[in-house]
Image (cartoon, rainbow, N blue to C red):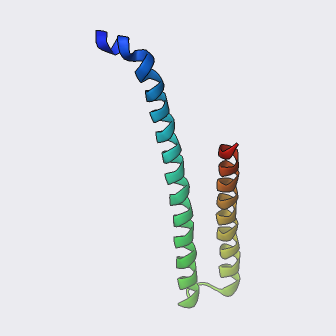
């Protein structure tokens, strides 16, 4: 306990950097999982259309929604990357 207090000026900033790194990693994992799930949904939608389970009109509407979500995620990732490089 006493040793922890003596080393706090050294371990404090290191702990803070580790915490920041973990938060960045968590955010990157979440964004990657979201994009991966959207791509899987798009593939599933294509299969449903190919099998005749949904109409062409419904396919086009849902495809556009998914593509817009994917594009928004990519733009957000690009903005975050640009901000972090500043």
Task: Pick the residue in front: 59 or 26.
Answer: 26
- Residue with the most extreme top position: 2
Task: Pick the residue in front: 2 or 34.
Answer: 2
| Residue 60 location, quadrant | bottom right
**Taking 70 as reference, is 19 left or right?**
left
Question: For the N terminus, which image quadrant?
Answer: top left
**Taking 67 as reference, is 53 left or right?**
left
27 is higher (above) or lower (below) than 3: below
Residue 69 at what x, y percent from top left? Answer: 66, 63
Residue 44 at what x, y percent from top left? Answer: 52, 77
Residue 73 at what x, y percent from top left? Answer: 65, 59
Which residue is at 54% across, 83% downward? Answer: 48
Res 52 seen here: no
28 is higher (above) or lower (below) than 15: below
Which residue is at 53% across, 84% downward? Answer: 47
Question: For the C terminus, which image quadrant?
Answer: top right
| Residue 56 location, quadrant | bottom right
| Residue 75 location, quadrant | bottom right
């Amino acid at each position: 306990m006493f040793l922890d207090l003596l080393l706090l000026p050294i371990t404090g900033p290191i702990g803070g950097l580790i915490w920041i790194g973990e938060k960045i990693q968590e955010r990157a994992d979440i964004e990657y999982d979201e994009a991966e799930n959207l791509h899987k949904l798009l593939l599933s939608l294509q299969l449903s259309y190919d099998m005749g389970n949904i109409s062409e009109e419904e396919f086009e509407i849902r495809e556009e929604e998914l593509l817009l979500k994917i594009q928004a995620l990519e733009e957000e990732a690009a903005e975050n990357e640009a901000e972090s490089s500043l």
